[in-house]
Structure formats: C-alpha cells, structure tokens
Image (spheres, rainbow, N blue to C red):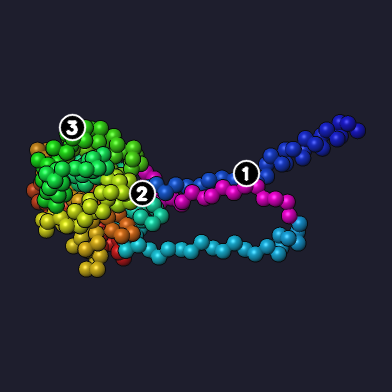
Amino acid sequence: MRKRVGFTVFILFAVAVMVGVPYVWGSEMLDDHGSSAAAPAAVSAPASPQTEATRKAAPAAPAAPSLPPALLHPAAVTVNATGFWSWTVLDRRTGAMAGSTNAATTQRTASMIKAWLAADYLRRTPNPSTSNLRQLTSMIRNSDNTAASYFWGLNGRSASITRLVQMCGLTDSKAFIDWASTMVSARDAARMGACIGDGRAAGAKWTDWVLTEMRNVSGSQEFGVVPALPATEKESTAVKNGWIARSDGKWHVNCMAIGTEWVLSVLTVYPTSKGMNYGADICSSVTRQLQA
C-alpha cells in the first residue's frame, strides 16, 4: 500500500512540474537577418484556483490597441546600385526595427557621428561656454570638421564611442582611428538616432537644443531623407548626414534622420567615380519606398 501511495505522489509531482511554465519571447532589437522580432511578452504570476463556473463567467481581457504605421515603416526595398548599401527603420513608439539583411555590417560614419559628439559633450557639460555652443552649432549645421576634432578631444576621443555603445545599446559598432572612422552598422545608427531623440544622449537640458540644430542644418547638409519626405514632415525631421571620399577610391555616404515617430539610417559605399549624389539618391530611394 505504501509503495502504491508513494508512486502516486511521484506521478502527481511530475505532472505539476510540467504545467504552466511561462516564457518570455522575442526582443525589440533587429536580428542579424534584418527581421523585426516581437516585443517581449509579460510574465504573469500563476493563476489562483478557479471553479469551472468562474472560468466560464470571466470576461475576456481587452485587446491592446494597435498603432497605425509610422510614416516610415517596414516595407520591401529594392535599389539597383553598385557597391554596398544597407538600411534600418526604427519605430520610436515601440522600439521595433526592420532593415536590410546586411543591417549589422559596419561602415565608417563620416560626419554622421557629429550629432553624438555634440550630445555627449552637452550631457557632460551642463553649462558650456558661448564659444563652445557656437562651435557645436557650426559642427551640426555646417558639418565643421575642425569643431568635430575639437569636441572629439574634449570627449576623450574613443571614450566617447565607448559611451555611445553603452548608453544607446549598440551591438556592432566600435571606435577606430578618428571620429570620422568610427565604425557603425545601419541598425546601430538607427539606435543612435533614437537615443538622441529620446534624451538619453544629451540629457533633459540639451536634447531639444541638439534636435533644433539638426532640424536647421544648411541646405547642402539636408540631402537624402528629407527631400523624399512629405512637406508636412520636413520641418519636424532632425538630420545628420555623413560623406567622405577616401583614398581607397570609394565614397562613404550615410544618412540619419529622426522623425516624430521613426528613425531611419542608410549607409552606402561605392566607387568615387559615381559622385556624392549617387549615395544621396540611394537614401532618397529607400525613404520613398518605406512610405509605401
């Protein structure tokens, strides 16, 4: 009799272990194949015992309201281009990302990194001098390289990129020989844009200032994303693009734009013989297709 009771207890214990184990699925981060994973599911506490009548009478939980797509949203993108190009779009409301299959491949940021250099300096310097604020304006609006080198030094050079990776949750990027050669992926560039937009980068005091400067870049700096946006969206979009023709015979032309509900990054590398506008046109093409 004791053996049968013991065996019954063992069976009941084993069944109890197998029942109702919750799982957390997914992540808001883009995976290496450019797909957007589901947001993490909440894990709830074990339910209290209920009678069959109670279970039948309980009302269904209301469904979470679905958000309409942001202006720029996941879509099929095709570009007939020579060389390398990648992109990532991020929904600022949910953190969900989607992008090209090579969105984790790193390239040089060129001047795109200047928005971070400004934010990193201001977060750590609550009361900058008037002279330094003027230089920050020149660095963002006019893409002043001398100012960028100055703030690169004040920020501790590669230490600034280390902070970028840690604060903004980057997964692929790293410092290199100078600010222009910082290596960043398309998905990390989108994360950087989101970090600047939500205030983590510059802090509460200076975020609006940085975004205002980015919304007022000079006409020559506004190529790529902004020209492909509806007129109603252009004024509210903050941008920092980057471009450099290197001695290896290749253009690096990159676009980063922060909209009200979205962030878009596009990276391109191609032969210098095609000119800078070739990369700008790729950025515009991707932007138009993500509005479809």
Report, in whole angstroms, how far the alpha carbon at label 2 lies from the one at label 1. Answer: 30 Å
Provide the major secondary structure of the magenta segment: loop
Q: Is residue 3 above or below residue 270?
A: above
Q: Quadrant of residue 13 in the image?
A: top right
Tell me the kind of residue under disc 3.
Ile
Q: Is residue 193 visible?
A: no
Q: Is residue 249 above or below residue 198?
A: above
Residue 143 x, y percent position in the rendering: 13, 48
Q: Quadrant of the C terminus?
A: bottom left
Judged by depth in the image, the label closer to the viewer, 2 or 1, is 1
Q: Residue at x 62, y 63 (%)?
A: 60
Residue corresponding to mark 2: 34
Q: Is residue 260 visible?
A: yes
Label 2 crowding class (10 Å Cα cut-off): few <14, some 14-19, many 20+?
many
Report, in whole angstroms, how far the alpha carbon at label 1 lies from the one at label 3. Answer: 49 Å
Residue corresponding to mark 1: 21
The stretch of residues the image draws in magenta is: 31-50
Tell me the kind of residue under disc 1.
Val
Q: Is 244 on the left or on the right of 10, as rendered?
A: left
Residue 81 x, y percent position in the rendering: 20, 53
Tell me the kind of residue under disc 2.
Gly
Q: Is 249 on the left or on the right of 29, as rendered?
A: left
**Per the image, is 32 magenta?**
yes
| Residue found farthest to the right | 1
Q: Is 277 on the left or on the right of 186, as rendered?
A: left
Residue corresponding to mark 3: 177
Label 3 or label 2, whichever comes before in sequence order = 2
Report how many numbered discs are placed on residues in the image: 3
Q: Quadrant of residue 124 in the image?
A: top left
Q: Quadrant of residue 53 in the image?
A: bottom right
Question: Which of 188/45 is in front?
Answer: 45
